[in-house]
């Protein structure tokens, strides 16, 4: 998925200054006769298989963002049942300096 417009607008205002962006990951499972299955989607930037992830839009609740991203990326309607984990990752600097 492309970079959200609000992030592009922020970049115009702050240049390469660090941005604290809040993201969400939706871990979707289902039971089958063969056992549990985990939904993975392929990332557009590097082709890796990963759970559904995305940046939370301004004023959007994390659970709503997870459901929105699941619908956008996998075409599946999902409902968040619980929060599993909260953490931060080390600072990331992209090749363009962002």
Image (tube, grey):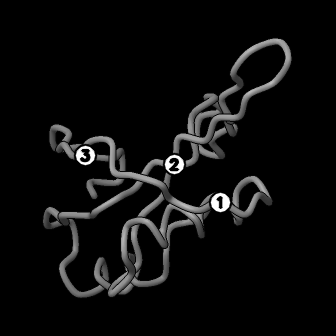
Q: Residues within 10 Å of mark 2 (few under 14, many from 20)?
A: many
- Please give the residue where the numbered disc 2 appears in the rendered image: 26
Q: Decide which of 2, 69 is in the foreground and name it.
A: 69
Q: Residue at x 22, y 74 (%)?
A: 15
- Please give the residue where the numbered disc 3 appears in the rendered image: 93
SS at circle 2: strand
Q: Are marks 1 and 3 in contact (CB under 8 Å)?
A: no
| Residue 55 drawn above or below residue 97 | below
Residue 47, how many percent across, how many down?
A: 66, 33
Q: Are marks 3 and 2 in contact (CB under 8 Å)?
A: no
Q: Earlier in the sequence, mark 2 or mark 1?
A: 2
Outermost residue to the right: 33
| Residue 73 drawn above or below residue 11 | above
Q: Earlier in the sequence, mark 1 or mark 3?
A: 1
Q: Are marks 2 and 1 in contact (CB under 8 Å)?
A: yes
Q: Residue at x 69, y 37 (%)?
A: 42
- Distance Cα–Cα, label 3 vs label 2: 24 Å
| Residue 31 drawn above or below residue 62 | above
């Amino acid at each position: 998925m492309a970079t959200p417009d609000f992030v592009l607008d922020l970049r115009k205002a702050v240049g390469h200054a660090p941005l604290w962006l809040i993201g969400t990951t939706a871990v979707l499972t289902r039971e089958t006769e063969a056992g549990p299955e985990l939904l993975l989607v392929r990332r557009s930037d590097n082709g890796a298989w990963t759970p559904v992830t995305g940046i939370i839009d301004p004023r959007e609740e994390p659970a709503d963002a997870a459901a929105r991203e699941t619908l956008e990326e996998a075409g599946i309607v999902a409902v968040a049942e619980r929060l599993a984990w909260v953490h931060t990752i080390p600072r990331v600097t992209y090749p363009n300096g962002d």
